[in-house]
Amino acid sequence: MGLKGFAEGGIASIVAGCSTHPLDLIKVRMQLQGESAPVQTSLRPALAFQTSSSSVHAPPPPPRVGIIGIGSRIIRQEGTRALFSGVSATVLRQTLYSTTRMGLYDILKTKWTDPETKSIPLTRKLAAGFIAGGIGAAVGNPADVAMVRMQADGRLPLADRRNYKSVLDAIAQMVRGEGVTSLWRGSSMTINRAMLVTASQLATYDSVKETILEKGLMRDGLGTHVVAGTPPPYKGAVDCALKTVRAEGIMALYKGFWPTVSRQAPFTVILFVTLEQVKKVFKDFDF
């Protein structure tokens, strides 16, 4: 296999990541709605007596704003260029995370393919996706953390903004202020998510594409590729989830759901369409 699988996957992922970056930024901003609201550290027992004179009531959370509202607010308050805040981190993240996961998936899929039938069962494709996704997420987590920091920085008060100049500057500031381990903050959740995404995304694409070609429904071209591709205030992930639910309710865990869906659909299509075109360019090269 050499490095070709890594190069093809990396180039396709960078193109897809940059193309859908504004949607990813809007998703992060939606997920951070309510983050600045104070969270009570001690909850009053349900049977405690009420004392009207000493009761402290938290202010009601601000009304939720949708995809269009968040996007319009970013443009109005920060300018159109703000939609691409943290795009350098996206490039680094895709270079580390997606290059690794797609290259490893290709290697494992080739290794586990039956040499006689030239086929590989879906279970092995899923296993290859789990392994490749987990390793890729571990490698790319520093860029992932930096990307979220850069995307979220614009919503902070001017006095509190870190004004990252680039992804390297964001990583350097984190290391200086919080230590090297901060680059892998939240890595357990990132790895779990990446394993599920990679297994479902790559295995599904391969299987759907193979079925379309075997049944002669479409020829191997752009149409087939599009059809097959459509589908720290906290101590840890659990502490983050508990505090979020306490402060904002259970549905707060699904903030940014629709932006996630609207970002993943075009990302997946662009990823695999670009990947197939890059493979055509690299087919005569061995490296």
Image (tube, rainbow, N blue to C red):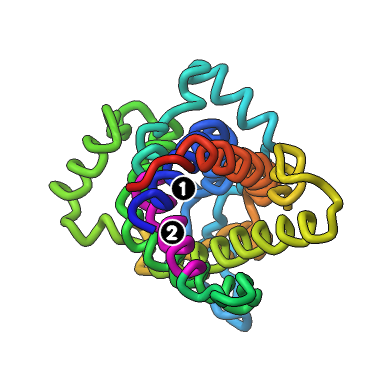
Toward which corner of the image does residue 223 lie, by quadrant? Answer: top right
15 versus 176 height, above or below: above
40 versus 85 height, above or below: below
Q: Residue at x 63, y 23 (%)?
A: 72
Percent from the top left, x then y, of residue 175? 17, 50
The quadrant of the picture occupied by the N terminus is bottom left
Q: What label does residue 101 carry, if any?
A: 2
**Residue 106 appears in the figure:** yes
Q: Residue at x 79, y 55 (%)?
A: 212
Q: Which residues are magenta?
A: 94-110
Crowd class of label 1 (few under 14; some 14 to 19; many from 20; radius 10 Å): many
State the predominant SS element of the stretch in magenta: helix
Q: What label does residue 94 carry, if any?
A: none
Toward which corner of the image does residue 85 lie, by quadrant? Answer: top left
Nearer the observer: mark 1 or 2; the answer is 1
Q: Residue at x 50, y 76 (%)?
A: 112
